Image (cartoon, helix red, strand yellow):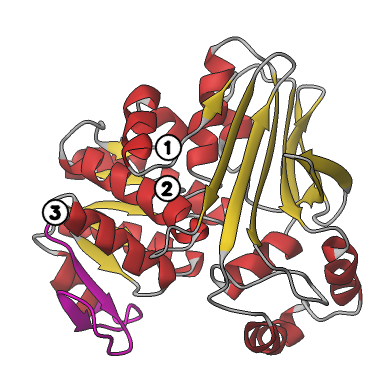
Amino acid sequence: MLVIGAGKIGVAIQHDLIKNGIEARICDVFEKELPNFFVMDARDTNALIKEMKGEDVVISALPYDFNYKIAKIAIKTKTNFIDLGGNSRIVEKELALHEEAREAGITIIPDCGLAPGMSNVVAHHLWEQGTREIHIRVGGLPANPKPPLNYALVFSIHGLINEYVEDAIIVRNGEITRVESLTGLEEIEIEGRKFEAFYTHGGTSTLPKTLHGVKELDYKTIRYKGHCEKILLLKQLGFFDDDARKFSEKILEKALPKNERDFVIAKIYSENMEAFLIDYHDGIFSAMQRTTAFPTSIIAKMVEDGKIEKGAYPPEIAINFDEFINELRKRNIKWKLK
């Protein structure tokens, strides 16, 4: 397999693949000391074509902007392709490649990480049990929060800001609708601790269309209390507008703490069911790396083993729930269903 992008998530994907007996190369635009590493600029189409040819599966651990381009190249090179998703419009474009992918004899699956990703598969399982009201709450948080934002950078700042900027897509009274991100603020209590949750973009992804008949569906990001108010102020002041966004991303990337011990909370519930996950830094990888990268490597192995049909599918349609949950347990990522 080939992992494109040697950031925190890409490195963890490669590690899990190798640990499970899979030969995995990894590349990035900058030189890094990693096994089977080589330098490649993902903006170079010819280089992508050359390196993707002959691979069983290519995994994009790049910002979402690259994914549609690489999916198109995967069809040309007849290479299975999966990615971390994160932007609903780009995911829709990838899934529109279904017939081309099927004719090329390959599988394309976007949204393979935490949320969207694991959360899609679990939400779909609840829907299969007959529930028609599903609420998804997910957050990656520093164990020791530092003001003023009480947050640490656990994945791409570009992807994070996208979640805060673009509208959230939800289902309300059986109708797909859009609501502004950073609204819908609510208090949520997890294991005796109080947090806040609010609408963000990308979390529901394909679920509004795949959970047929769902009456209520929403996704909110979990943060320490007070975070939403501060981010909303930055947004209202224009720091995330097109002409200022790159500058704001650079400032936040420098200002936010990095390499902090973290934990991930995920709660998916309906009127009569609940799925809950809490995961911690394991001494090697952060909770965000574990819960984003390991599901991705599991799905990559399923694709390589021919367990998923040819074509382009969202994870909730493609993945066998029981097998997926069992593989997660082997990595000590344990969902509690009740």
Q: Mark 1: which amino acid?
A: Pro
Q: Is residue 143 above or below residue 270?
A: below
Q: Tell me where residue 238 appears, x and y as whole percent.
A: 86, 79
Q: Which residue lies under the disc numbered 1?
A: 315
Q: Can residue 184 be seen by looking at this rendering?
A: no
Badge 1: residue crowd in 10 Å (few <14, some 14–19, many ≥20): many
| Magenta residue check for 43 | yes
Q: Residue furthest left?
A: 54
Real-space Cα separation, disc 1 to disc 3, in angstroms: 21 Å
Q: Tell me where residue 205 appears, x and y as whole percent.
A: 59, 43
Please provide the residue range marked out in magenta.
23-46
Q: Can residue 23 be seen by looking at this rendering?
A: yes
Q: Mark 2: which amino acid?
A: Cys
Q: Nearer the viewer, mark 1 or mark 3?
A: 3
Residue 112 badge? 2
Real-space Cα separation, disc 3 to disc 2, in angstroms: 18 Å
Q: Are marks 2 and 1 in contact (CB under 8 Å)?
A: yes
Image point 54% across, 68% down: which residue?
155
Residue 22 badge? 3
Q: Is residue 213 above or below residue 189?
A: above
58 or 115, which lies in front?
115
Q: Mark 3: which amino acid?
A: Ile
